[in-house]
Image: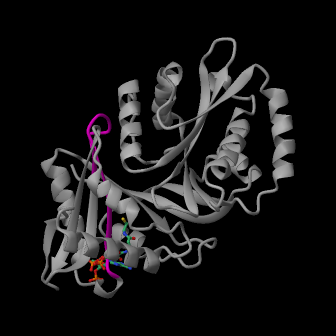
Amino acid sequence: MTHFDIVPVAPSDHALTEAWLDLQEAVDGHDFAGLRPRGPVWPLMRLVVGGGDTRREHWAAVCDGKVLGHLDLNFSDQDNTHLLGFTLGVHPAERRRGVGSALLRHAEERAAEDGRSTLHCWTAVPHESSPLVRGDGGSFLVSKGYKGSLDAAIRKVDLDQVDESALDRLLDEAWERAEGFELVPFEGAPPEELLDGMAYLHSRMYTDMPLGEWDLQEADIDRGRLLDWSRQRRRRGELHLQVAVRHKESGEVAGFTEIVVEAGEERHCSQGDTIVDPRFRGHRLGTVLKVANQRRVREWRPKMRYVWTGNAVSNEYMISINEAVGYRLAGQERVFQKTIA
Ligand SMILES: CC(C)(COP(=O)(O)OP(=O)(O)OC[C@H]1O[C@@H](n2cnc3c(N)ncnc32)[C@H](O)[C@@H]1OP(=O)(O)O)[C@@H](O)C(=O)NCCC(=O)NCCS
């Protein structure tokens, strides 16, 4: 058993912060090779930019100035206050010496202190489509009483390989079914007239997507929270490309999709949420939205190469749209969850 302390990561402690970033890159390279690489800016931005509805804590297991492991905690404060989200990792050369166990114990203690009953964590698991991904995290969590609660497939689209003329044909067919709707593309905070409709659809994401056994409960997202999320993204230097689709006659927001390009990212970006209001489903709006926003990526960032997405494996409709617009299977991830009280 190695001796170490678990300390909060303060951004003003530059040596600790750098060692903490190096540790995360070492874990990523060792355990999650072939998946979306995460540069140092992503964790750095989460360290320094907090949000109104979520408290974050960042901890490091430190021995003689060396960072052996990291633990990141997410406390949602305006919904799902029974949950504590966490991510942890231990340097590949320091494993099986109790560091991971101590960090996980720390997470469970912080959950209990904060009155949270359920811990949950997303992590990639081995899959034939991602031969370099290791399974240490899942095995460790299962040995600690965590249960796999939701399986999600990871897909990526290579924008260099997309058959744009096939997409044109797909769009033509889709628009025949989407008469009476119009697209509204925007970046950053939604325009005033879309704010309430967008907030409503963001709330629906919590109830409409397949959740398996994952204990995510509904959330009331209002315009204030949406604007706060936009402010945070701006501070983190993120490009937030969104397209909404509006029902022309009523003016209602029928659906939206979003892609996020994080600061410092030149080749990889992420698909965020996509949703069509149940009242407006069956008009191919999902396809129209996805093609439009995918094309905007290259307009804003001509050299961007890959967009990554994740869908519950049971989410057949979304997956078939993703396949049609060029996404291909690239791995699998799982939510692990444990109730402590
Ligand atoms: C998961 C991880 C944090 C474990 O860290 P660790 O410091 O090696 O964990 P510990 O030494 O405390 O392990 C304690 C026990 O967990 C179990 N365990 C740990 N790793 C395991 C593995 N790869 N396979 C099976 N059981 C494992 C064992 O029971 C182990 O006890 P033992 O060594 O006496 O057999 C580390 O493998 C890691 O960083 N993986 C990549 C990141 C990740 O997947 N994080 C988890 C999800 S957020």
> Which residues make up the magenta segment?
74-91
**Residue 247 drawn in magenta:** no
Quarter of the image where one finds residue 39: bottom left
Q: Residue at x 86, y 50 (%)?
A: 165
Ligand 1, seen in the image, is in the quarter at bottom left
Q: Nearer the viewer, residue 59 or 41?
A: 41
Dominant secondary structure, magenta: strand
Can you say whether 7 is above or below 231 in the image? below
In percent of width and height, residue 280 lies at 67, 24
Left or right, 7 with respect to 228, comes to left
Can you say whether 111 is above or below 200 in the image? below
Left or right, 105 with respect to 216, comes to left
Q: Residue at x 32, y 71 (%)?
A: 21
Count of numbered circles in the view: 0
Left or right, 51 with respect to 114, comes to right
Q: Residue at x 29, y 67 (%)?
A: 144
Q: Nearer the viewer, residue 8 or 151?
A: 8
Q: Nearer the viewer, residue 70 or 300?
A: 300
Looking at this view, name the residue that lies furthest to the top: 249
In percent of width and height, residue 215 lies at 38, 44
Can you say whether 204 is above or below 109 in the image? above
The quadrant of the picture occupied by the N terminus is bottom left
Q: Residue at x 45, y 31 (%)?
A: 203
Residue 246 visible:
yes
In percent of width and height, residue 18 lies at 27, 73
In percent of width and height, residue 84 lies at 28, 50
Give the image's coloring scheme: one colour
Residue 222 visible:
no
